[in-house]
Image (tube, helix red, strand yellow):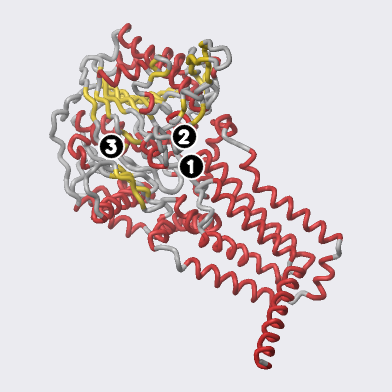
Amino acid sequence: MKKNNISKRYIIVFFNKCIKNIINYIKHNRLFLSYLLFSFFNCFLIRYLTVGNWYNYKTLFIDLSIAGFFGSFTYFIKPDKQYYYLLTLLIINTLICTINAVYYTWYSSFASFSLLATLGQVGEVTDAVFEKLTILHFIYILPLIFFIYINSRLNKKDYYNYMKKVEKSKTMFIFTIMISILVLGLNLSMISKTSYGSLIKQWNRESIVKSFGIIIYQGNDLVQTTYSKMNSLFGYDEASRKFVDYYNNREKEESDNKYTEMFEGKNVIMMHLESMMTFFVDLKINGIEITPNLNKLTKQGLYFSNFYPEISVGTSSDTEFTVNTSLLPVSSGTVFVSYYNREYVSLEKLLSDKGYYTFSMHGNKAGMWNRDKMHPSLGYKKMYFEESYDIDEVVGLGLSDQSFYRQIIPILTDIENNNNNYMGTIITLSNHTPFDDLDKYPELDLTYKTSKVNDETGETEEVVFDYLEGTKLGNYIKSAHYADLALGEFIDKLYQDNIMNDTVFVMYGDHDAKLSKSEFNYYYNFDFETGEVKNEDDPTYINYDYYENELNRKTPLIIWSKNKQLKTEVKYYMGMIDVLPTISNMLGIKNEFALGHDIFETKWNNIVPFPNGNFLTKKVYYNASKEEYKPLSNEPIDEGYIEECKQYTENIIEISNDIIIYDLIKNEKDRVGTYEE
């Protein structure tokens, strides 16, 4: 009994001593612990409000341990100066979180040092950026304010003079940094090899933030950005070897189908339809067609109904690049801004070599997305941008589509009269977020009217629900309705003036509207009986999840000619990387460096790779971030199939990146046996 009492006494003494040590640690480290708490809070919040995996304990401990690691060096500084060091760390933390919060809202991705060069583009879309800002984007500043307040309170209590007498700097540093390293190492050891693969390749930023947290992501991005600059000097040989091996060893694709050389010798007009989604095709609201002219074109031409943008942070510029070169957007930075001075094999150059006059038209500034430098690099001989037009009517970000189309008709007529063949790109502008020029759009009723019996009077009354009126999706629908009206007027004018009869038009939506998933969930689950969104337990509720939203991002692709109506819907899954090979076959030309495929050759076997590592096939949509997929058919799917498609996607991303970064087409084309001058 006596022995048991002694044991209990030792336990109590030990326990009390631990409590006392904890209390003393808190008492003597108030400023440091405040910094630790606030840094952790911001790191937690940025994940919670973006990728959403706040519950991942490994990432929570990684955030905490990294803050502790950097904060531990404060113990080398005198107590009255520690505040400035910790304040600097917290300011950096606040900037990282705030910038990434704003960036994620705009691009659904995280910021990169390599993307700083694109900040100049923000000035062109200021309204669109500010339209998406909310108070939550600046919530990360609050901990900084609280930290400054805590410091002022500690100063008043003479805390720092007291700490000069009691603080054991060396002991506290060793204790803090050892605990931080131990916790960090333990949690990093539990992360999968696939996650480390994402970290090394930096393709999927969301996945990195989910697994490693925002600080490791940003630190890794800094290393990767610096490394890519160094690598462009020192990594060339390896990239060159892979490039040559890939093109010399890949199976040569020969296109020979009913569309081969169908449009050989024809003029070509690429029509870049801003933010136009397949969602609108045949859509009616209150009996009114939203895009009647687009609908008509899909019935007259070759309509590709499962066509997907493969964009990164370059949005519209990424589309222009991929459509015209059959290469993917670069993983770090944007091609138009960072790699405009490379040599590319493009549709413009291939047709220019055959004597075509090439040009581009856009109602915005030539400097937007660096087009004034990139378009000549792609092979355009003449550019008609903002300075070429009378800005007599503004809708959205600049010259209205209606005025733009009216003003380019005489230019197109002159081009046709003075050239045997021509190829041009027409880039529209009005249907660009924030879709807020409501007074300039045609009248379109987006309310919902129904009749109900009044329970009190027994009489039938008309009830009006706001439905889509006043919503972001509703405004987007009105904007698309206007863009379609302008497009229809343009097509009608081509018939009236009897021009461009020997021309094939390639019309494509450049990307989706970048609206939130909740906007579309509201649309698909609106209850017309109650005027509210259905509950998930409603048997008619549509589960509009991540995969449904990704699959809904598709845009229309239409190949159309006034005098050759093909009247065919093509349902094969394809990406923008497949446009050039498909069109080239129709025109009787070939780009040996294309990474996409003629869709009429691959058909249902096509794999659509996305720059973030996701991919789409007839069987699955694969999410590289979560390493999971959504089946799209009843066909059996095994891990071998997923792994094969995954390896294909990663290979295409890597080869495309190497071509762009190292300018391999210019430097190594002669080593590729299939290349034809």
443 up-or-down from 227: above or below: above
Which residue is located at x 80 percent, y 75 percent? 166
**Label 2 SS:** loop
Quadrant location of the C terminus in the rendered image: top left
- The answer to whether marks 2 and 1 mark residues whose Cβ atoms lie closer than 8 Å is yes
Q: Is residue 594 visible?
A: no
* Kind of element beneath mark 3: strand
Query: Mark 2 or mark 1, which has the lower sequence index?
Result: 1
Residue 268 is tagged as: none
List x then y, in percent, for residue 123: 57, 33
Q: Which of the numbered marks, if any, corresponds to residue 574?
A: 3
What percent of the width, then of the height, locates residue 236?
35, 57
If you read the primary sequence from the N terminus, does the residue marked by circle 3 or circle 1 appear first?
1
Q: What is the three-letter code of the residue carrying label 1?
A: Ser
Q: Which of marks 3 and 2 precedes in the sequence?
A: 2
Residue ranking furthest to the bottom: 2
- Identify which residue, 465 or 160, lies in the foreground: 465
**Which numbered dot is residue 108?**
1
Q: How dense is the environment of label 2, judged by Cα within 10 Å: few (below 14), some, or many (20 and up)?
A: few
Residue 295 place in picture, x, y as percent: 32, 19
Dot 3 and dot 1 residues touching (CB under 8 Å): no
How far apart are labels 2 and 1 at the CA level? Answer: 8 Å
Front-most of residues 156 and 580: 156
Q: Quadrant of residue 319?
A: top left
**Which residue, given by chain and number where applicable, does mark 2 sit on?**
514
Q: Amino acid at mark 2?
A: Lys
